[in-house]
Image (tube, rainbow, N blue to C red):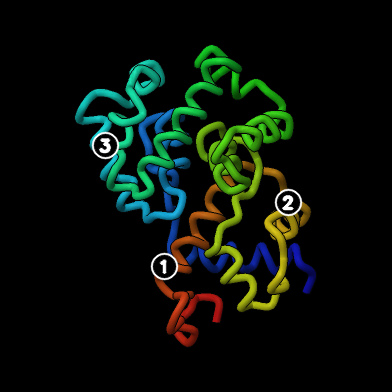
Amino acid sequence: MGKKNNLLTIYKRLFLCFGQQRWWPADNAFEVMVGAILTQNTSWRNVEKVIGNLKKNNLLELKKLSRLSPKKLASLIKPAGYYNLKAGRLKCFLEFLRKSYAGNLKKMSAEPMLKLRQKLLEVKGIGPETADSILLYALNKPIFVVDSYTKRIFLRHKLIQKDASYEQVQNLFMRSLKPRAQLFNEYHALLVRLAKDYCLKNNPKCRECPLG
């Protein structure tokens, strides 16, 4: 069976098991972008606390967040961990949005995907996973997001090598599947669900796994 059929079979099994995941949970594209930066090295549960904090204080807007001092912003995002570091990263990203697109997300979305990706990667604190999360989940661009869950699952199923790079794993999906944002969105969300429910880092539930 070719890689394309393998990947489609995995997707269909996961979708049959878990159903639609409706990810990324957010009210708008800007909230997704903020969440993508905050979720670095922390759980989504902690990010939800921060998003709730910002909404409660009516601050989840580009102009309002930009006006906050780094110290104040850090205090508001404390539940996400590494709050001083992430406050700095958020500030850099907000400045990028303001300078490059005058804060206009439609203008940002009109940029060719790979060109925009390169610009995002030049923003301090934004790596491939965060950049691709912004592209896929906030701007609906057809690019596959790779995370530690993806690598864990596909390594255990011998579809990638242990030393496979981010780009190599991403290319596996990009070359084998049709470039559809909705497909990439749902596929990645299903892999996250599988990793959390069955393909655990320690003591994986292999016998019960939908891909068993």
Name the spot of residue 41 as percent of width and height, x first: 44, 54
Give 194 or 52, whichever is nearer the viewer. Answer: 52
Residue 211 horizontal side relative to residue 35, left or right:
right
The amino acid marked with disc number 3 is Ser
Point 48% across, 24% down: residue:
94
From the viewer's perspective, is residue 161 above or below residue 183?
Answer: below
Question: Which label belongs to residue 174?
Answer: 2
Q: Total label count?
A: 3
User: Which quarter of the figure has residue 34?
Assistant: top left
Residue located 31% across and 50% down the image: 46
| Residue at image mark 3 | 75
Q: Is 142 left or right of 51, judged from the image as shown?
A: right
For numbered disc 3, what is the local secondary structure?
helix
**Above or below, comparing residue 101 to residue 8 in the picture:** above
Mark nearest the camera among 3 and 1 is 3
Mark 3 or mark 1, earlier in chain: 3
Amino acid type, callout 2: Met
The image quarter containing residue 133 is top right
